[in-house]
Amino acid sequence: MAKFKVVISDPETGKSNVVELEDARAVPLIGRKIGDVLDGTVVGLSGYKVLITGGTDSSGFPMRPDIHGGIKARVLIGRGIGYRAKGKGDRRRRTVRGNTITEDTAQINMKIIEKPSRKGRKSEEKTESKSET
């Protein structure tokens, strides 16, 4: 079965947490693509919304959003994920993984895009205290 290491980053604080998902907990992620927005309950963050930003396979090949499917491919890359060009116009053929999460994926990167609202909690507390008096 699938086993993923999920790295969840919080852009507001700059911190990240690692969650390991196995078997039944990992199944909802299979078939998802880079750029998909998920409910945070999949990774144990109820009330949050998370965005899949990338990942790697067990050999360390990065997932690239412009390669469709879950395949491993050797593509000519000028810049971006999987290759850092040293000069202008420099291109190399590099092995990268497609944008779909499969059982071969080892690590998935996500970032929090929506947190549960705290205003709702405070307004509920205020209405409860008013009704008690």
Image (cartoon, rainbow, N blue to C red):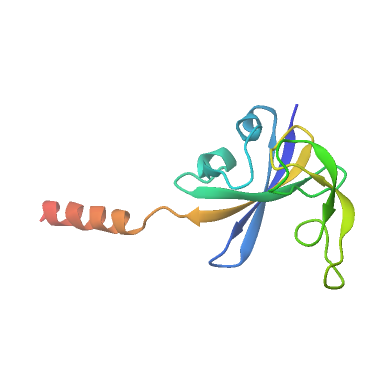
> Of residues 132 and 98, which is closer to you in this image?
98
In this rendering, is residue 120 above or below 24?
A: below
In this orientation, which residue lies closer to the viewer: 92 or 40?
92
Q: Quadrant of residue 127?
A: bottom left
Question: Residue at position x 62%, y 64% from top?
Answer: 15
- From this viewpoint, which residue is outermost toward the bottom? 87
> In x, y percent, where is residue 98?
74, 41
As drawn, which residue projects farthest toward the front?
89
To which quarter of the image does residue 32 belong?
top right
Please give the name of the residue rendered at 50% of the width and 55% of the height, measured from the top-left corner: 113
Toward the viewer: 119 or 108? Answer: 108
Q: In this view, does 89 lie above or below 72?
A: below
Quarter in which the C terminus is drawn? bottom left
The image position of residue 102, as x and y in percent, is 73, 33
Q: In the displayed structure, would residue 68 be above or below residue 52? A: above
Return the residue found at the far left.
133
Q: Give the total number of marks visible in the rendering.
A: 0
- Image coordinates of residue 1 in percent, x first then y, are 75, 26
What is the x, y in percent for residue 44? 56, 42
Query: In the figure, 33 relative to 126: above or below?
Result: above
Q: Which residue is drawn at 24% across and 57% down?
A: 123
Give whichever of 115, 99 is nearer the camera: 99
